Amino acid sequence: MLNNRQITIVDTTLRDGEQTAGVVFANKEKIRIAKMLDEIGVHQIEAGIPVMGGDEKETIAKICKMGLKASIMGWNRAVISDIQHSIDCGCDAVAISISTSDIHIQHKLRTSREWVLESMMKAVDFAKSQGLYVSINAEDASRSDIEFLIQFATEAKKLGANRLRYCDTVGIMEPFTIYEHIKRLREAVDIDIEMHTHDDFGMATANAIAGVRAGATHIGVTVNGLGERAGNAALEEVVMALKYCDNIDLGFKSEKFRELCEYVSKASGRFLPTWKSIVGSNMFAHESGIHGDGVLKNPKTYEVISPEEVGLTRQIVIGKHSGTASIKAKFREFEIDMTEVQAAEVLARVRETAVELKRPLFDKELMFIYEELYGYPEH
């Protein structure tokens, strides 16, 4: 348990999230999302890429002037002119990104490790001379030679960089190896580390938490796990996993998670699955007879967190897998007290109908079954 540590949440929905293929936020949506992120407690918002100019730069500048509690970061290449655009917007922090893996250096940048170090150092030196908070991003860190990564972090630290962003750019890591990487980095260089994990193998949140356990101090996230390819570690998952798995309560207004996730879902044009962890509508929907009975007796039997904590409500779903306890509880909502025999008879009809329709039953359909068996109820 890590309950004595403060973890900083860095939300990049407006930058990496918008880099999702096919996603574009309207200017007003970006401003609204920034405000909502600030309201729930996000510590730092990566608001976009100022060097893009036009609407992007203008909107980032507006976000910087909103008086939010969160730090506002601009994303930059390791190029001084990029950083100047972030300064123009009023960003108090900059992310300076450059590849550190040999596959990127050789095939994307077509240069050398020495050039990477020199470019990074010039950019960090300039940013610090302007009084900015600096995150130096090691792109493709998870495929980088660890000794070079240590050298990269050491040189950045010497020039005053505030943190190293460890990027699992192509999402190839798993928690056990990432733990070892971060532990070694922390032992070698006294610099804060941010986990920036992608979900290509479905382990972005797990990898972020593993990094924290190894000594990382920051976690990069996006709402709904939005991001390139399979996306990033999801804000709502990371915050709740820290709270319930590692006893780190960041004090976020998690009751607003569902509202935030729905808004970003609509703004991004990306469907929010009913089975989505933390905020999906099925998180607190119970159909199985055993589960329904347990939850009706004590919600903690099958719910680790309460639905109200993330802005949802509990649902007892009546369908093929329901039991008599759920049937009786559902009909009590209609002010009908059923006997055990009646509940069993209704349940038999419910299962038959659910199989026929291939779905759970609506309240009206349940009442039709009751009326067919017993006539109209008397109140």
Image (cartoon, rainbow, N blue to C red):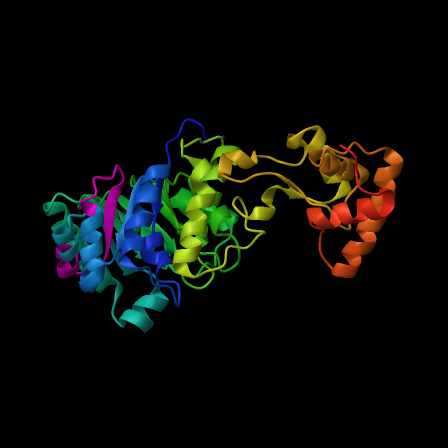
Does the segment drawn in magenta span residue 76? yes
Residue span colored magenta: 64-84
Quarter of the image where the C terminus is located: top right
Residues 113 and 229: in front is 229
In the image, farthest residue toward the right: 341
Q: Is residue 284 above or below residue 339?
A: below
On the image, the x and y values in percent for residue 344 come to: 86, 41
**Residue 259: which quarter of the image?**
top left
Q: Residue at x 40, y 38 (%)?
A: 215
Q: Residue at x 79, y 31 (%)?
A: 337
On the image, the x and y values in percent for residue 82 come to: 17, 59
Does the segment drawn in magenta span residue 354? no
Report whether 99 appears left or right of 83: right
On the image, the x and y values in percent for residue 162 come to: 24, 42
Q: Is residue 148 above or below residue 10?
A: below
On the image, the x and y values in percent for residue 192 come to: 31, 41
Q: Residue at x 64, y 31 (%)?
A: 300
